[in-house]
Image (tube, rainbow, N blue to C red):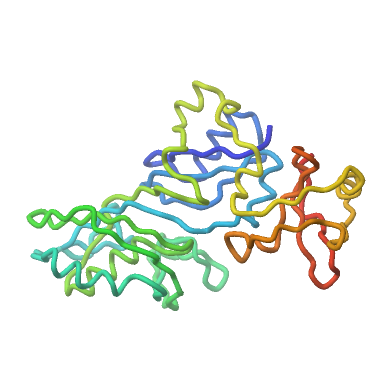
């Protein structure tokens, strides 16, 4: 069994919990998720199964989309409502104030990663230090937020719901905390649902209970489904035989796609087919003028 499963991750499951459940359902050991979701977050979690795990480091799209709820007037050590409360205060923010502040958090911004995060510093993950009661100075990191849309604001309750489209590595909890600070108060994230990852949306996902009932095979996509955005190249029977034996192909003997791929990373790779048979992924070596084998799937 190999391919891609699109899971709607449930609340109170870590991403590794999902992998453990899938190992039980599929009886496969080689399973890996493509991007960590916090335990209390839900939503899109693409999971690679079998030898499709070798694609994890060349997925073409690292963009994410989230629906997040923020609650003003509370600050915690985890930057969400499930952490230890450090401060509470009455707030009376208005929609106009929020609308004025949000543009400051779009585009290329700098964020300080939360202490409760998997970022490594001096060889240790920040959450390991935080769990022992420690805190360390940490440099701000670049992040990109493409858009923020207000979905709802409950002024009496001081809760805000946003749709956020961002690049991978953006911390929504930090964005929430920074927004609260910018408005002169504090805020904590109260819910998070990932609505898009790796180009896949929630409507394409299946919950674990349904997957167990149906069987994984019903929902398993081909490995190349994870590589949406890559261009394709068709090769001859002789070229296919050479490629499957690990041999590089002469670029001058290939009809390369004229249209650029959808991302810079995807420009380096091509999905290699013989007729309608998927052989694997090739990496372009412009210096050697060759298409080299990145991984095989035949």
Looking at the image, is 185 positioned above or below residue 161? below
Q: At x 92% / y 46%, what residue is drawn? A: 238
Q: Quadrant of the C terminus?
A: top right
Question: Which quadrant would residue 276 be assigned to in this image?
Answer: top right
Which is nearer the eye, 123 or 45? 45
- Near-viewer residue (151 or 76): 151
Q: Is residue 46 left or right of residue 130?
A: right
Q: Identify the residue at horizontal 42%, vertical 62% (top origin).
A: 166
For the point 50% across and 40% down, the residue is 17
As drawn, is 179 to the left or to the right of 185? right
Q: Is residue 204 above or below residue 34?
A: above
Residue 53 lies, in percent from the top left, at 66, 46
30 sits left or right of 113 in the view = right
Please identify the quarter of the rendering in which residue 267 is found.
bottom right
**Image position, residue 145 (x, y; %):** 39, 66
Q: Quadrant of residue 147?
A: bottom left
Q: Work out whether residue 120 or residue 282 is closer to the camera in this orientation and state it.
A: 282
Q: Hey, which residue is sitting farthest top in the picture?
A: 213
**Quadrant location of the N terminus?**
top right
* Image location (x, y in percent) of residue 37: 44, 50
Counting the numbered discs, the total is 0
Q: Quick check: 22 left or right of 297? A: left
The percent position of residue 186, horizontal first and vertical second, equals 20, 67
């Amino acid at each position: 069994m190999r391919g891609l499963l699109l899971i709607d991750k449930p609340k109170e499951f870590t991403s590794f919990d999902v992998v453990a459940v899938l190992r039980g359902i599929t009886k496969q050991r080689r399973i890996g998720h493509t991007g960590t979701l916090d335990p209390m977050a839900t939503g899109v979690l693409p999971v690679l199964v079998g030898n499709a795990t070798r694609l994890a480091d060349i997925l073409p799209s690292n963009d994410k989309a989230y629906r997040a709820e923020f609650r003003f007037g509370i600050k915690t050590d985890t930057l969400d409502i499930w952490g230890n409360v450090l401060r509470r205060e009455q707030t009376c923010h208005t929609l106009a104030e929020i609308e004025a502040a949000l543009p400051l958090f779009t585009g290329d911004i700098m964020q300080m990663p939360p202490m409760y995060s998997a970022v490594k510093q001096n060889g240790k993950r920040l959450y390991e230090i935080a769990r022992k009661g420690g805190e360390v100075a940490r440099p701000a990191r670049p992040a990109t937020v493409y858009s923020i849309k207000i979905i709802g604001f409950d002024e009496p309750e001081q809760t805000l719901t946003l749709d956020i489209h961002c690049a991978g590595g953006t911390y929504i909890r930090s964005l929430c905390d920074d927004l609260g600070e910018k408005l002169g108060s504090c805020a904590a994230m109260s819910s998070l649902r990932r609505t898009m990852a790796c180009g896949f949306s929630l409507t394409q996902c299946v919950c674990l209970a349904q997957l167990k009932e149906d069987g994984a095979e019903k929902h398993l996509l081909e490995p190349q489904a994870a590589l949406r955005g890559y261009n394709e190249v068709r090769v001859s029977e002789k070229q296919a035989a050479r490629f499957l034996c690990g041999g590089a192909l002469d670029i001058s003997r290939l009809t390369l796609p004229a249209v650029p791929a959808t991302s810079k990373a995807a420009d380096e790779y091509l999905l290699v087919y013989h007729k309608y048979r998927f052989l694997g992924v090739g990496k372009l070596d412009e210096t050697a003028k060759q298409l080299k084998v990145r991984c095989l799937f035949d």
